[in-house]
Image (cartoon, rainbow, N blue to C red):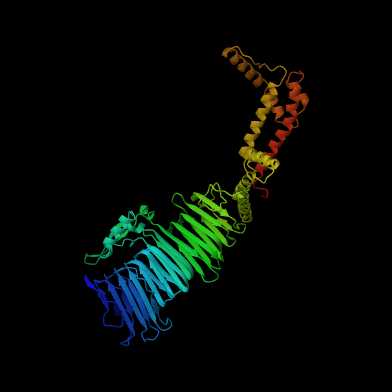
């Protein structure tokens, strides 16, 4: 590699390929039209820009129709100066390519050109494209921090494919090892990657996973090696650490498509008329805040790792469709001050509990209105599911709704007691099993108490040792079992007192027996009502 202190490169010159140069000073790249050209392509290969690059390209006053500027296997350090790239996109095409490069810091502000492409590159600090008019921005298999902000005429495409995620070319081989050691990474594709996007016309994020695994060697017809590729294994896909944060404003962003992605985090923020389509995606942290859109479609969406979170707050989900979404795959799900009544749910798997947290990162810090907010969540979900004739899940929300409000401090003690009884008896009209066991517990409790209250019950206190205690237990048990006819009588809330006297061989009953008989009419009748109510859960309106 040749060391050079060259500070100015004119793309209009004779050079088409500049390779193996170690630039020790800031390199200013310009286009001064000394010779009229229709098309020009300049490639930088295996170069190191130790003080960075400054683009000073203005094609608006030139006659060139197409300019391709490519950087391949280059290391580009940070520069402190402002880049300027201008072209007349109606007449001129300016393409800027970075392939297998290490970029420490690159900022493009108020630039105007056709296409910016970044392929298989590492960004150590940031890549910033802001307030620019770039028709197409393509980022493929890149890792690092990327900021694409306020580019209303740009279409952004982010692609990942598992067949070329390794970055092991000439200049980057040593850099990869240093980065992996510095950040304690197992593989370079585990590098923390964050996309911060706002006010872009279109956004597309897509992953492609092939059916191959491990190293594959592609050969020419003469059996010579053409190319070697490494395909990620299923276990290695979990090492990806890619997050996307999108901020929406007004009507700038028209469409967002996220497909087949493996994301660590996804964030949506802002009000807009955007159509958002997210499908076949795994995401361990979904955050939606102060959000509304023309349409939000979530299809085949789930989490796969531990400590996964889904938080939606201060949002309107009226135009949202959860289709085949596994909400129960998240460790914690929270809806806070969010409209859910008109949300559509299809084949959605709900978790056991849906929180109502102001900040999901502090789940133990619950505000005073927590249970009231949780009640509102379940109520809105119940309405949404009932409107879609999903009676089964609507009943689940119906039960959880009352369980939430039962814990509210604003609810009266009387109402709390009623809800407590409804919960233990039939889970608020949703469980036949609970009502049946409740009936058995109350019936046998009444029967045993009634039998022991009979005047000739043999039990006594003040035993003289274990022998007398065991004898008393046996006598009492035999006495209770011999009075089994009273069980059937008490199970009938309309039983006659004469029947109880007849079962007691015509002997008079005690005052306690009359009282228990009276209580049994109320309690057993209530049990039958709770059983019938639970039995009719699919036929009643919740």
- Determine whether 106 is above or below 260 in the image: below
- Determine whether 123 is above or below 438 in the image: below
Residue 18 visible somewhere in the drawing: yes
The quadrant in which residue 15 appears is bottom left
The quadrant in which residue 65 appears is bottom left
Q: Residue 184 at x, y = what percent?
A: 33, 53
For the N terminus, give its image quadrant: bottom left
Q: Is residue 481 left or right of residue 42?
A: right
Q: Is residue 499 left or right of residue 143?
A: right
Q: Residue 489 at x, y = what percent?
A: 72, 27
Out of 83 and 336, give the one closest to the viewer: 83
Q: Residue at x 29, y 79 (%)?
A: 9
Q: Residue 187 at x, y = what percent?
A: 32, 56
> Total of numbered circles in the picture?
0
Q: Residue 37 at x, y = what percent?
A: 32, 86
Residue 217 visible somewhere in the drawing: no
- Determine whether 39 is above or below 266 in the image: below
Out of 344 and 224, give the one closest to the viewer: 344
Q: Residue at x 46, y 56 (%)?
A: 283
The quadrant in which residue 458 appears is top right
Q: Residue at x 71, y 33 (%)?
A: 523
């Amino acid at each position: 590699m040749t060391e050079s202190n060259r500070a100015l490169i004119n793309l209009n010159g004779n050079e088409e390929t500049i390779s193996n140069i170690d630039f020790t000073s800031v390199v200013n790249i310009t286009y001064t039209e000394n010779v009229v050209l229709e098309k020009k392509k300049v490639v930088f290969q295996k170069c190191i820009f130790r003080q960075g690059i400054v683009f000073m390209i203005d094609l608006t006053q030139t006659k060139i129709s197409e300019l391709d500027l490519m950087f391949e296997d280059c290391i580009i350090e940070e520069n402190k100066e402002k880049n300027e790239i201008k072209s007349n996109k109606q007449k001129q095409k300016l393409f800027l390519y970075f392939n297998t490069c290490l970029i420490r810091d690159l900022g493009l502000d108020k630039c105007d050109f056709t296409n910016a492409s970044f392929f298989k590159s590492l960004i150590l600090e940031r890549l910033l494209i802001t307030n620019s008019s770039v028709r197409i921005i393509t980022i493929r298999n890149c890792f690092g921090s990327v900021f694409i902000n306020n580019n209303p005429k740009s279409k952004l495409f982010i692609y990942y494919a598992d067949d070329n995620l390794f970055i092991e070319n000439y200049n980057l081989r040593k850099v990869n090892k240093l980065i992996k050691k510095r950040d304690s990474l197992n593989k370079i594709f585990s590098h923390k990657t964050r996309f911060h996007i706002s006010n872009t016309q279109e956004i597309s994020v897509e992953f492609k996973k092939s059916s191959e695994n491990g190293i594959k060697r592609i050969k020419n017809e003469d059996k010579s090696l053409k190319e070697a590729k490494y395909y990620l294994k299923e276990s290695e896909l979990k090492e990806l650490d890619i997050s996307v944060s999108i901020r929406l404003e007004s009507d700038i962003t028209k469409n967002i498509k996220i497909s087949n992605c493996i994301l660590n985090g996804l964030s949506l923020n802002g009000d807009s008329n955007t159509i958002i389509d997210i499908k076949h995606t795994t995401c361990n942290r979904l955050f939606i805040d102060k959000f509304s859109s023309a349409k939000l479609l979530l299809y085949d969406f789930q989490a796969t790792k531990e400590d996964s979170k889904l938080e939606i707050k201060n949002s309107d989900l009226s135009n949202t469709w959860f289709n085949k979404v596994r909400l129960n795959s998240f460790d914690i799900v929270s809806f806070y001050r969010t409209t859910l009544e008109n949300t559509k749910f299809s084949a959605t798997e709900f978790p056991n509990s849906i929180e109502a947290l102001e900040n999901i990162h502090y789940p133990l810090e619950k505000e005073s209105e927590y249970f009231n907010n949780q009640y509102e969540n379940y109520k809105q979900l119940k309405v949404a599911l009932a409107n879609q004739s999903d009676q089964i899940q609507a009943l689940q929300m119906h039960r959880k709704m009352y369980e939430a409000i039962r814990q509210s401090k604003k609810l009266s003690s009387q109402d709390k007691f009623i809800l407590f009884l409804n919960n233990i008896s039939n889970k608020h009209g949703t469980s036949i099993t609970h009502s049946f066991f409740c009936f058995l517990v109350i019936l046998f409790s009444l029967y045993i108490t009634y039998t022991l209250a009979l005047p000739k019950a043999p039990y006594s206190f003040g035993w003289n040792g274990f022998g007398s205690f065991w004898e008393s237990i046996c006598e009492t048990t035999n006495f209770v079992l011999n009075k089994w006819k009273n069980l059937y009588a008490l199970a009938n809330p309309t039983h006659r007192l004469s029947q109880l006297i007849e079962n007691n061989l015509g002997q008079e009953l005690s005052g306690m027996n009359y009282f228990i008989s009276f209580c049994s009419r109320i309690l057993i009748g209530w049990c039958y009502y709770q059983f019938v109510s639970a039995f009719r859960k699919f036929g009643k309106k919740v």
